Amino acid sequence: MVKLDELKLESHETKFTFSDNEPVVIKSLVKNGPHISDIELEFFGEQILLRDFADHSFDGMNGEVTYIPNIWTITNSDSPTFCAIVGISEVVFINFASKSFAPPFKLFRDNYDSGYVSLKAIGTVDGFLLVYESGVALFRHNGEVLWHKRLHWDDIFDRSDDAFLYFSSEHRKEGEEWRMKIADGEVLSGW
């Protein structure tokens, strides 16, 4: 089972150092207008700009900006091997072992989506699941996508075990719950 650790940006520029690896710097470049930010990544001597990648919110009461790319480190042994950065509609991976960056992976999102109602990362034997309101994706611990399935707008993630993800719906009758196999994303009726 891989281990997932969620990280939070503490300011518009946050530096993370993972064991003996070089630091990864994540900068949120806040733009004027809607709550959309560019993200700049600096790692292993490279700079990568992800345009319109993340969300941010401004609290008028205390003048603070909250930066919202969701970040998880994926540990397959003693030290983190990957970092997954989830933006509004894409996921990017930094591979610490090969010192490389995987191209962004597109999530199922509508144009008007500017944040997440629900977003959960779950460690599995082969990698991790990303469960969000529009879909579910299973990634290997190296960032490879094994499968990606769309969810209906009113599907609600309830729980998981070693073999299944369990869902209900706001508008289905009791007993119309369903489950999804973690191994291949196959949907089965009932719990």
Image (spheres, grey):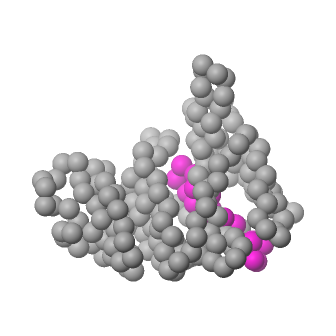
Q: Magenta span has 79?
A: no
Q: Is residue 185 visible?
A: no
Residue at position x 61%, y 28% in the image: 58
The residue depicted at 32 percent of the width and 58 percent of the height is 158
Residue 94, magenta (yes or no): yes
Q: Nearer the viewer, residue 56 or 21?
A: 21
Q: In terms of depth relative to the viewer, which is nearer, 161 or 144?
A: 161
The image shows residue 116 at horizontal and vertical percentages of: 46, 46
Residue span colored magenta: 83-100
Look at the image and tell me in which quarter the C terminus lies.
bottom left
The residue sitting at 66% across, 23% down in the picture is 63
The residue positioned 58% from the left and 52% from the top of the image is 70
Q: Is residue 130 visible?
A: yes
What is the tally of numbered marks visible in this picture?
0
Q: Residue furthest right?
A: 45
Pick out the residue farthest to the front.
Answer: 78
Q: Is residue 39 left or right of residue 182?
A: right
In this rendering, the answer to whether 65 lies above or below 41 is above
User: In this image, 25 relative to 182: left or right?
Assistant: right
Is the residue 64 above or below the residue 114 in the image? above
* Residue 1 position within the rendered picture, expressed as x and y whole percent measured from the top left: 53, 78
Whole-percent x, y for residue 13 in the image: 77, 44
Of all residues, the one furthest to the top in this rendering is 61
Figure quadrant of residue 44: bottom right
Q: Nearer the viewer, residue 63 or 145?
A: 63
**Magenta segment, principal secondary structure?**
strand
